[in-house]
Image: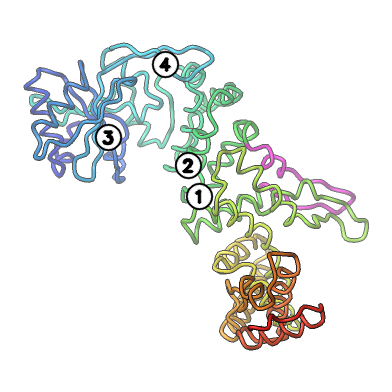
Amino acid sequence: MNLKKSLADIPIFEQVGTIADQLNMETYLVGGFVRDVLLNRPSKDIDFVCIGDGIRLAKAVSASLPGRPPVTVFKNFGTAMIKVGDWEVEFVGARKESYQSDSRKPRVEAGSLQEDQERRDFTINTLGIAVNGDRYGELLDPFEGVRDLKRKIIRTPADPEVTFSDDPLRMMRAIRFAAQLQFDIAPDTFDGIRKNSDRLAIISGERIIDELNKIILTEKPSYGFKLLFVSGLLESFFPEMVALQGVDSVGDKSHKDNFYHTLQVLDNVASRSDSLWLRWAAIMHDIAKPATKRFNQKVGWTFHGHEDKGARMTPGIFRRLKLPMDDRMKYVQKLVRLHLRPIALVNDKVTDAALRRLLFEAGDDIDDLMQLCRADVTSKNDHKVKRFLANFDKVEKKLQEVEAKDQVRNFQPPVSGDEIMAIFGLKPSRVVGDLKEEIKEAILEGQIQNNKSEALELMYRLAEKKGIEKKTNH
């Protein structure tokens, strides 16, 4: 097979081939770019392998290009990278690798092209395209990667047990590729993952979460999570999620399997939003159900308070998984805490105060909260689903009406703590916080309008009751 036509639109390929010929260096385009060309997928990175010194080739290519783009050299890895337009172009000499049992960092030495391809993780990533003049565009496929692309199979070129024992991160990558491409994992390859799942312990949390987030961002993330669960990998780094799986029964009363429910909610969110953190909120929304599960003879299984407990669990889980501890964690925590609130507002008798309070607490994330709530409707009963979604339509309408009238989303109390201190000559103290809080509560309860004059009037009344006098110069 010759792929010369597939390379025609990107001039760097011929340029590298020309320089490689001048240096008498056998050179190949390899890896993900070749795979994605055959799958008609967009690709960001271009990797070249040469038989010889990859850094020397990179420097020569750079010198031949307009503006001589700088060469970034990674000496420890024997690689070099140059930026050409929007592309990151990497060069490396062909190599073979050997591993120690306690590390995924290999001992590297120069090798043949065959050895370089054999060390790669999966057959679909072993493909190469020659760029030297006499063979330009020729496809090299020593491990039947094209066949596996057609069969939609993830398979290792070498013994999977050796592949995964050497570099256990490849187990996460196998599942990530399967999830991204919607491929199956070959049975012997999957067996290799199951047998080596405990080897994931030598991989850093940062590397694991990077792969997990890529799985979460796939079109249907439940597929990747099911593979992680069945392989035993999920248990090793996210036991709280594994604990959701299973159904308990007492007599004829059972609860749903909260693991598979969570995956359905995640898929529902993924069908509506590309947001990684809204997807994390879906993953975390019922995370405390195992800890709050109780059986009541009258009503069956209950999970009272799982939303508050889940919000309290969120920082610890994020910290352990090496997820960010900034506003992104607080966003997920907020949605977990509030995810039951909108359905409680369906009742026709619900007060504007309850609506105002939800708007205030959710702030700009109210729309995402409503998306999560809609995604949380996973019943197989179509009539029930329609009824729940219609109820959410009502809630959203009520929220819009209250917001238009009272503008409480993200509002700051019209009188600040600094103003209270200045008016009454107070220092920072509990009484200042109490006054500010009572003004906020009065607005949320609809006792006063959300404006400065009414807030000041209330503040003076409250201060008088507390025996606080205004400074004479105010």
How would you rate the neighbour count of disc 2 (Cα within 10 Å): few for under 14, some for 14-19, many for 20 or more? many
- Separation of residues labelled 3 and 2 (CA atoms): 19 Å
Amino acid type of the residue tagged 2 in the rendering: Ala
> Which of the labelled discs sits on residue 106, or is there none?
4
Q: Where, quadrant-wise, is the C terminus in this rendering?
A: bottom right
At mark 4, the secondary structure is loop
Query: What residue is shown at x 35% (from left), y 18% (from top)?
Result: 118
Q: Where does the image place residue 389, in percent across and percent down from the top left?
A: 62, 71
State the residue in front, 143 or 296: 296
The reply to whether the magenta stretch includes residue 284 is: no
Q: Is residue 455 above or below residue 182?
A: below
* Highlighted magenta segment, given as a residue range: 238-259
Q: Closer to the observer: label 3 or label 4?
A: 4
Amino acid type of the residue tagged 4 in the rendering: Pro
Pointer 3 residue: 34
Whether residues under marks 3 and 4 lie with C-beta atoms below 8 angstroms apart, the answer is no
Pointer 3 or 2: first along the chain: 3
Pointer 2 residue: 179
- Separation of residues labelled 1 and 4 (CA atoms): 34 Å
Q: Where, quadrant-wise, is the N terminus in this rendering?
A: top left
- Separation of residues labelled 3 and 4 (CA atoms): 24 Å
Amino acid type of the residue tagged 1 in the rendering: Lys
Query: What residue is shown at x 54% (from left), y 58% (from top)?
Result: 269
Q: Closer to the observer: label 1 or label 4?
A: 4
> Which of the labelled discs sits on residue 310, or is there none?
none
Which of the 4 image quadrants contains residue 115? top left
- Separation of residues labelled 1 and 2 (CA atoms): 7 Å
